[in-house]
Image: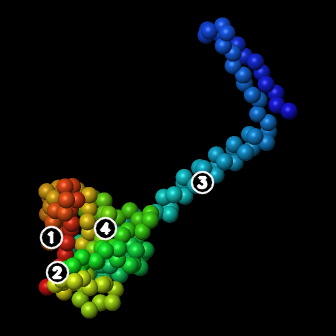
Amino acid sequence: MRSVFWVAAFGRHPLRTHYIERRSLFTLMKCLFFSALLALTTAALPLTSHAAALDTPLTCNESGHQFIADLAQQQLIDPKPTRVESNSINAFSPTRGADLTAYGFHVFAVVGYEKDDPMFRVGDGEPVARSAYGVVVFGGESKVQNALTEAGSTAIVHRVAPLITAIFCKRS
């Protein structure tokens, strides 16, 4: 049985009243349990996400196969391409919980291609290069170019759309 207390709200309208319900021990235990469960879940969330900075591989010193295979092995990208362009560039999506960055910019797509490699699908047109890889980031072209120049990267910067820029490495 619930115990209810009637309390007059002094200093307010005289006809307004408030009821305060005394909670049972079981109700307080449930509240405490769910609060602890919420705190543990919140604390564990950073452990389930994978953060990775892709600055080092984007200095253009590895192959498209090595770049994509390393990210797939670390489970940072889905190993199956989500899109294949006519120039054979394969687009890969970051996995859920993967927080990829390149030179401080958030990565939302990873791209790559290597000729005669079964990891990649071939497009309808002429391949862009024998080996190519890169990322697509949120950021303006000039800001991305400045970040790459400061880091000494030889990667190509290409504007995809307003505030969306590709950072690209290719070998002929």
* Residue position marked by numbered label 3 in the rendering: 40
- Mark 3 or 2, nearer chain start: 3
Amino acid on which disc 3 is placed: Leu
Residues under numbered marks 4 and 3 in contact, where contact means CB atoms less than 8 Å apart: no
The C terminus: image quadrant = bottom left
Q: Is residue 21 above or below residue 134?
A: above
* Residue position marked by numbered label 4 in the rendering: 109
* Residue position marked by numbered label 2 in the rendering: 128
Disc nearest the viewer among 4 and 3: 4
Q: Is residue 151 above or below residue 81?
A: above
Q: Nearer the viewer, residue 73 or 162?
A: 162
Mark pair 3, 2: CA separation = 48 Å
- Mark 4 or 2, nearer chain start: 4
Q: Residue 156 shows which numbered tag?
A: 1
Write the residue at 79% across / 39% down: 25
Quadrant in the picture for residue 108? bottom left
Q: Visible in this render: residue 86?
A: yes
Mark pair 4, 3: CA separation = 31 Å
Amino acid on which disc 4 is placed: Ala
Disc nearest the viewer among 4 and 1: 4
Crowdedness of circle 4 by 10 Å Cα count: few (<14), some, many (20+)? some
The x, y position of residue 18, in whole percent, is 69, 19
- Mark 4 or 3, nearer chain start: 3
Q: Secondary structure at mark 4?
A: strand
Crowdedness of circle 3 by 10 Å Cα count: few (<14), some, many (20+)? few
Quadrant in the picture for residue 133? bottom left
Residues under numbered marks 3 and 2 in contact, where contact means CB atoms less than 8 Å apart: no
The x, y position of residue 111, in whole percent, is 27, 74
The N terminus: image quadrant = top right
